[in-house]
Image (spheres, helix red, strand yellow):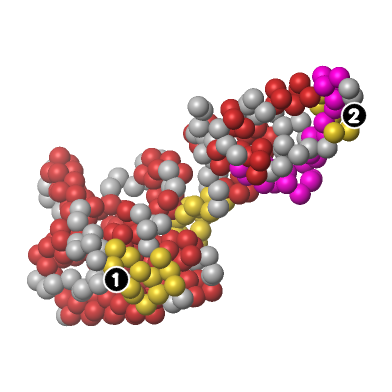
Amino acid sequence: MRKFNYEDWNIEPELETGNDDFVFGNYVDWDRFRQDEEENLLAYFDIQLPWGEELFLSEYFELLRQEVFQNTSIVEDCDLDKLEITTQSNIISEMVIQFPRRKDSKSDEIISAVFDYYGIPSGTEYEHELPEKLKYWHNMLENGYLESEYENYRKYPLKFGTYKKTISEIALKVSNTSDTLTKKALILSSFIISESLLKSAIVSKIPKETAISKFSKEILSKEIDNKLRGSVNKRNELFKQLFNEKAPKQEWINLRNSLAHDIESSTIQGNEISYISFIDHKEYTVNFDNLFKQQMDFYKKLQKIMKNDDE
């Protein structure tokens, strides 16, 4: 069975930014993609839906032999087995059936079920959910703008002021949206941005070596990059080596890992999110307000450490 392959399509993700132009990442509105490319998608899978046409009974039965109808309950669910007979005849082969028009009430349901069967995504997918080639940060790396995370944060550090505005903006978006998946995506984005702030702080402390060879610089850059991309413990160890002080506590790490691994596994009830920790496999519940307060406390403590280090 042929399945949907996004690489066969010219999909242009949209960019999600904050009021201060901070980039959260890409997103794709798959429902709009389905709508815009409906005819092309049907042709791609060789699906015949003769909207509004009259069909001889033999043509109708041939239509229902298509794989998507054989392997699903679309015919029963969408009443395709109850179509109007427009021409009666004593000869079965001469009976004529009216296929639904595209604007009829069940037509959207038919299209949706067909596209679901072939694995065409629906809803809105954000940066962390998208295939690698559709991600904003992936595209930047592919195009050669950023040599590594180390070089990225050296050239484009996340400033404290930008961080504060961005986290406040995400908190407001979480409060104002009713869609649970969007809430989860925004919360995960806030954790990624908090990681970026810590990485920016680490890189700002690393002296830029000028008296070493290009080869040695590449080795140094790669080693630092591995630690930046590594586990939380690796980043915290590097922070302590550089600042001679422990990194501010990041109390959201277990939730961050849960969301990144399987965003659907967590549940949202009111102003709280519940998740299963990978550490002890127990369920924990966290209040949204506490989550964002933890991140603002993290930002203040980190800023204080860096200020003291400069004195």
Image quarter in which the C terminus is found: bottom left
Q: Choose between 112 and 239: the one closer to the eye.
A: 112
Q: Is residue 306 visible?
A: no
Range of magenta residues: 91-113
Disc 1 on helix, strand or loop?
A: strand
Q: CA distance from mark 1 to mark 2?
A: 63 Å
- The x and y percentages for residue 173 are 50, 71
Q: Is residue 291 left or right of residue 104?
A: left
In which quadrant of the rendered view does residue 92 lie?
A: top right
Residue that label 1 marks: 284
Picture residue at 19% right of the left edge, 49% below the top: 226
Mark linked to residue 39 = none
Q: Is residue 79 visible?
A: yes
Disc 2 on helix, strand or loop?
A: strand
Picture residue at 54% right of the left edge, 36% below the top: 118
**190 in the magenta segment:** no
Question: In the displayed image of the protein, which residue is found farthest to the front?
Answer: 90
User: Which dot, 1 or 2, sits closer to the camera?
Assistant: 2
Give neighbour class at mark 2: few <14, some 14-19, many 20+ (Cα, 10 Å).
Answer: few
Give neighbour class at mark 1: few <14, some 14-19, many 20+ (Cα, 10 Å).
Answer: few
Residue that label 2 marks: 87
The type of residue carrying mark 2 is Thr
- The x and y percentages for residue 232 are 20, 61
- The x and y percentages for residue 137 are 39, 50
- The x and y percentages for residue 79 are 71, 42
In which quadrant of the rendered view does residue 187 lie?
A: bottom left
Task: Using the image, determine if residue 30 lies above or below residue 171.
Answer: above
The type of residue carrying mark 1 is Tyr
Picture residue at 76% right of the left edge, 39% below the top: 82
Residues at marks 1 and 2 touching, judged by CB atoms closer than 8 Å:
no
**93 in the magenta segment:** yes
Q: Choose between 96 and 12: the one closer to the eye.
A: 96
